[in-house]
Amino acid sequence: MNTDESRDSKVLIKEAELLNASNDFIYKFYKNTEKYSTEIDDILEAKLLSKNDPFIDIVLAQYCQHEATIFNLFSTAIQSDNLPLKLACLSNEFSAYGNSIPSSLFRENRWDDCPLLLDWFKSISYSEIEVLFSNKSIDRNWLESLLECEDKFWTILKEDQQKHILRSLCKNSVIQHRDNGFFLDGLLEYEHNKLFYNIWSLTDKLPTTRQYAYVLSILLEKTAFTRLHFDVVEVAKRWDIVDEKESKTDDELSLNSYELIRFQLFKNFIKDLYGDDCSNKEHFDNPDIAYRCCAYSQLKNITIDDMNSIVENDGALAVNYLLMNDNLWIFEETREVLQDLCYKVDRKHPNGISFCTNDFLVRKKKMEELNPKWFIEKIFDESNDDDKLLNVGTMREFLKELKEDATNGIVNISKIFGKELFKIGLILYAILLIVLIILF
């Protein structure tokens, strides 16, 4: 610990303030303080702990920024079997100056050689699993090793605990983020993607039970895509299982869990075929419905004839996955066909519910927000039967024509009503130009 003489003046002032503040003030301060704050040190947090106030302990467990603090709190929670305090420690995302959770809870630099950590993990509760694995500050290296399904932390768990880990990871943003816009060299790129790769590799390791299929299908959907180095087609065969409890009907809008896993895996395979001279028919005639739906949602060169044929064969399910294909939203013509197909399949629904049409409208709104240039309105040119797309060139032409028409109109008015009205016309002309500039 530092002595008072060597401590930052900001910390000393904040310490005097917090030690004499109300619990509510301490809570609001910590909750609103950013990571790596220069106003907090380990001495300040130790003095707050010495108050032996359960409320302050809970606040520090969630928001403390020093490893010594959270270590002491978690040790107390284990000894007293205080579950709320343990959960608060496991949720901490701010312990910035030590190891990540759970390593910092035991002050161990090597989690793979920490008997205390292993002993606690053997008896970890479901609520502790949920909080720990949804914490975005979880120790990434420890998590990567765990998901290899071979180390002692994974093998000591029961099957239900393993599945609960995967369910909890679905809530964690760490599995969705890639490089955050930073340049990564080859080694750093590999290390950064290792977590994503290990999650995708679970398809080649986990048992193919219905329960595992359900949670894994959700996890893959939320996990960032990365290049896979195993045989995707062969691994997909592991999950080619008929689920009698989820038999598909004609108006089904989604794949079942087994099919969704194959769908996610085939994304890797179909992306490699973008540049190949491979006819759409080869994809659309594939006997695996998961493969066909993946093709509907991924391929770039789907024609209007293809769209009609696809929906004729696979009905509402095909429409649902065509709506996911960004390439079909670029042009107005294909968007109109998509909407017509939604109407078509909805009319066949026995309850008359417009599932596909509603999905179309939701998807359209999202695409308009993401790609507004695809939805630029058109201006009709009376001299030509064809529509002119609104762009910089046509806009200039349009403004030029309005300017000429307005000028001619003002001149004609001046000839009739004289100079006084001519002045008024100039003012109106100026106002018109300002309005045009604001609008366009």
Image (cartoon, rainbow, N blue to C red):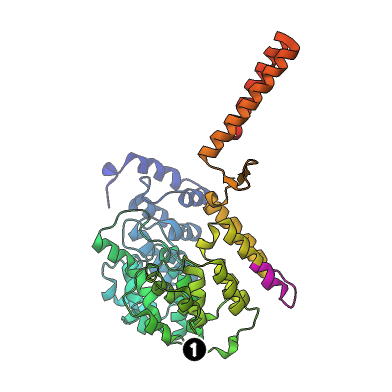
In this view, the residue in front, 276 or 6, is: 276
Q: Is residue 11 left or right of residue 286?
A: left
In the rendered image, residue 307, in percent from the top left (x then y), is placed at 57, 70
In this view, the residue in front, 369 or 71, is: 369
Please, what is the three-letter code of the amino acid marked with disc 1?
A: Ile
In the rendered image, residue 323, in percent from the top left (x then y), is placed at 57, 66
Residue at image location 42% in from the left, 82% down from the top:
236
Q: Is residue 263 left or right of residue 227?
A: right
Residue at image location 30% in from the left, 77% down from the top:
115
> Vertically, is 38 above or below 342?
above
Does 351 appear in magenta? yes
Could you say which quadrant of the image residue 193 lies in? bottom left
In this view, the residue in front, 305 or 108, is: 305
Does 440 appear in magenta? no
> Vertically, is 238 above or below 410?
below
Q: Which residues are magenta?
A: 341-354
